[in-house]
Amino acid sequence: MGLYTDHILPRCIACGMGHHKFAKQRVRAFEHVSGRVLELGFGAGHNLPCYPAAVTEVLAIEPALVNRKLARKRVEVCPIPVKWVGLRGEEIPLEDASVDAVTSAWTMCTIPELRRALCEVKRVLRPGGALYFLEHGLSPDPKVAKWQRRLTPCFRLCGGGCHLDRAIDVLIRDAGFEIHDLAHPAFAGPKAVTYLYRGVATPRG
């Protein structure tokens, strides 16, 4: 932890993630979200304008405390109540079966213990609830995947723990979810960072 991790990097990410091309993907990913929503990696609040009117409350998990300041204006103008509830996806301070949906956008790449976080997601979801995700990760193209594996150590170091080579769908299924409507929308940019996973996952069993 330090100046770069705590202050510089979150501001750089907030600036980049505010581009309109990200918003278009968010709207599509979260168009059917409703009720009480837990958001993993709230960041600077860029998901807020993309939630439908059916969302009644957003509970924010966000490790970078400076993002509370960066998100302030978006929170203030948002008609949906927002409550900061925790710092880590691996330790969600909510009761069992207490939320209707969980959302995650460009977040699973950085969660240190992703399987543990996904188990926490399963725990807090109410029966019939779902995880709505929009993530980047491992490409099926062997050449791109090779570069993703080469670059990941550097990205982890300078990008707040970002993994370019996580197979998001495999990790979600291995944590006990069934995935519905999985899509890989085209996204402009370097191939190593733009292979997307968009879908909905529900707990098995």
Image (tube, helix red, strand yellow):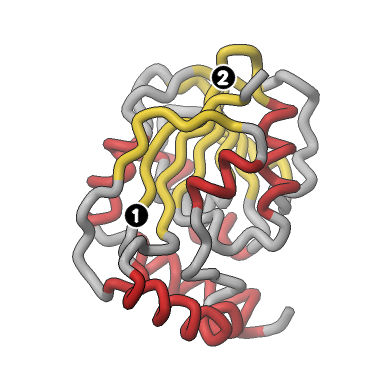
Q: Say which residue appears at 50% left-offset and 37% top-offset.
A: 103
The vertical placement of 131 against 4, above or below, is above
The label number, if any, that marks residue 50 in the structure image:
none
Reading the image, the residue beneath label 1 is 196
Picture coordinates of residue 151, whole percent (x, y): 47, 84
Is there CB contact under 8 Å for labels 1 and 2? no
Q: For this view, does 96 lie left or right of residue 31?
A: right
Q: Residue furthest top?
A: 127
Q: Say which residue appears at 52% left-offset and 61% top-offset.
A: 166
Element at badge 2? strand
Q: For this view, does 98 lie left or right of residue 161?
A: right
Q: Quadrant of the N terminus?
A: bottom right
The vertical placement of 179 against 169, above or below, is above
Count of number-bearing discs: 2
The 10 Å Cα crowd at callout 2, few under 14, some 14 to 19, many 20 or more, is many
| Quadrant of residue 123 within the rendered picture | top right
Element at badge 1? strand
- Of 143 and 198, nearer the camera is 143
Picture coordinates of residue 73, whole percent (x, y): 43, 50
How far, Cα to Cα, is label 1 from label 2? Answer: 23 Å
Q: Amino acid at mark 2?
A: Gly
Q: Amino acid at mark 1?
A: Leu
Q: Earlier in the sequence, mark 1 or mark 2?
A: 2
Q: For this view, does 180 lie left or right of residue 183?
A: right
Q: Quadrant of the C terminus?
A: top right
| Quadrant of residue 50 within the rendered picture | top left
Q: Is residue 73 visible?
A: no
Reading the image, the residue beneath label 2 is 129
Q: Say which residue appears at 55% left-offset and 84% top-offset.
A: 158
- Of 162 and 205, nearer the camera is 205
- Of 73 and 34, nearer the camera is 34
Q: Say which residue appears at 40% left-offset and 50% top-offset.
A: 46
